[in-house]
Amino acid sequence: MLKDRRILIEQELAKTQAAAAKMYLDIVVNNGDPHSTEYQKIKDHIMSLQFDLNMVNDLIDKGHE
């Protein structure tokens, strides 16, 4: 169960990071707004996914499946 959850989190994280990278590039190249609500929301989502992935990996490392 946790290994399946890890795969789903990793997939969502990769997709979200790709979207954030596009936004970041736009901010850097086109002098966009790094404080925009949309950009902050996607950053928060990435941090949440990373936290979840860390917890799942920790539980798997401790023998939970």
Image: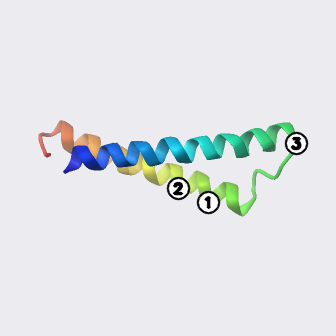
At numbered mark 2, what does the secondary structure look like: helix, strand or loop? Answer: helix
**Mark 2 packing: few (<14 Cα in 10 Å), some, or many (20+)?**
some
Identified at 15% across, 40% down, the residue is: 62
What kind of colouring is applied to the model shown? rainbow
- Do the numbered discs 1 and 2 sit on residues whose CB atoms are within 8 Å? yes
- Do the numbered discs 1 and 3 sit on residues whose CB atoms are within 8 Å? no
Left or right: 45, with 61 as reference point = right
Tell me where residue 45 appears, x and y as whole percent: 52, 55
Residue indicated by mark 3? 30
Amino acid type at mark 2 = His
Tell me where residue 23 appears, x and y as whole percent: 72, 46
Identified at 50% across, 50% down, the residue is: 47
Residue indicated by mark 1? 41
Nearest the camera: 36 or 11? 11
Identified at 62% across, 60% down, the residue is: 41
Q: Residue furthest left?
A: 63
Disc number placed over residue 63 in the picture, else none: none
Tell me where residue 12 appears, x and y as whole percent: 46, 48
Residue indicated by mark 2? 45
C-alpha distance separating marks 1 and 2: 6 Å
